[in-house]
Image: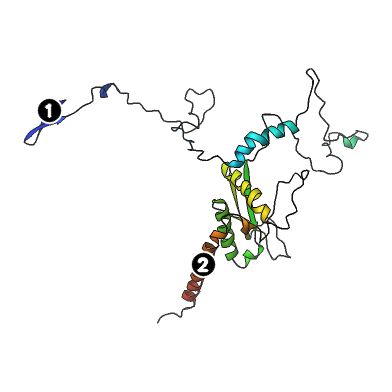
Amino acid sequence: MSSRTRGKGPCLVLRDPCAHNAPRYQFHAPKYYRGPLHPVQPPPSSDPIARNFAPGPFNLPRLKQTYQSTIASDIMTMMYQHTPPGTPDKPERIRLREWDESSPYMKNRPKRGPRGGDVLLPLEKPIDWRNIPKIHAVHLASYMPKAKKNFDHIIVGKAILQSITGVRPTLTKNKTGVAQWGVAKGDRTGVKCSIYGNQAYEFVDKLVHLVFPKIKEWPGIKGSSRLRRLGLGEDQHILICGTQAHLATVRVILALAWSRRIYRISLKSRPPTP
């Protein structure tokens, strides 16, 4: 405690006795990762002072709990193959065929593709506890070829996708033109978005437990199909929770779009003032 005069009377200033002992240095995480041998290493992503720190997760989806408790162990049980210790590894199968070099023109040629097709499929590693299949992301896309003539289809598609996923969609363009549909290369005729993590588990949970049972003509999915893509019709995507509640919002957006368009047309068609 010290006293000093300020104006007419003395003024008391309280000071912390340990303030002079407190260090003034504060650690700031490095902006770039310069390798494992650099003396200054960034903190882990779970540390709040890390630059890539993201709080959460704030929820635990029911489907994820089912995956961790039941599905993961079932997959390991189904894919288990007993190999006695000391068994040599199987030789790797030759996927690309070599030339027999019966002709001098075949020398130094690149290897040929597999029989039955030129597409070389990726190798599937044996499943163990390190690489059990799980849901990483769900990608949603909507293709609307009529959006070339009427941009309101894009507005409706973006509103519906955003109401379903909670993620702002992005526009997609045609890679090739289709004359039958009247679209050309580079036309904006679709929207897409991606959801990751717990949000992807919640979306798949909605599809399995709420949407598929409501579809009367749902043919089902075969266990041997290895299906990774799924399409829903115009009358089926409305069954997803959240879409019906946002249809009124979509109508309001369309009304605002049409009113803005009519207002622009009226401004352009107004005769010039003298």
Q: Quadrant of residue 233?
A: bottom right
| Residue 8 position in % (x across, y down) | 6, 36
Question: Gap between marks 2 and 1, in whole Å?
Answer: 69 Å
| Residue 28 position in % (x across, y down) | 41, 30
Tell me if mark 2 has few (under 14), some (14-19) or many (20+) residues whose alpha carbon lies within 10 angstroms of its own: some
Instruction: Tell me the SS state at disc 2.
Output: helix
The residue at 75%/33% (across/down) is 78
- Which circle marks residue 3 in the picture? 1
- Which circle marks residue 123 in the picture? none
Q: Is residue 53 left or right of residue 145?
A: left
Q: Residue furthest bottom?
A: 274
Between disc 2 and disc 1, whose residue precedes?
1
Q: Is residue 23 left or right of residue 184?
A: left
Q: Quadrant of the N terminus?
A: top left
Q: Quadrant of residue 172?
A: bottom right
Does the image show residue 251? yes
Tell me if mark 1 has few (under 14), some (14-19) or many (20+) residues whose alpha carbon lies within 10 angstroms of its own: few
Looking at the image, residue 103 lies above or below residue 248: above
Instruction: Tell me the SS state at disc 1.
Output: strand
> On the image, numbered disc 2 is attached to which residue?
257
Q: Quadrant of the C terminus?
A: bottom left
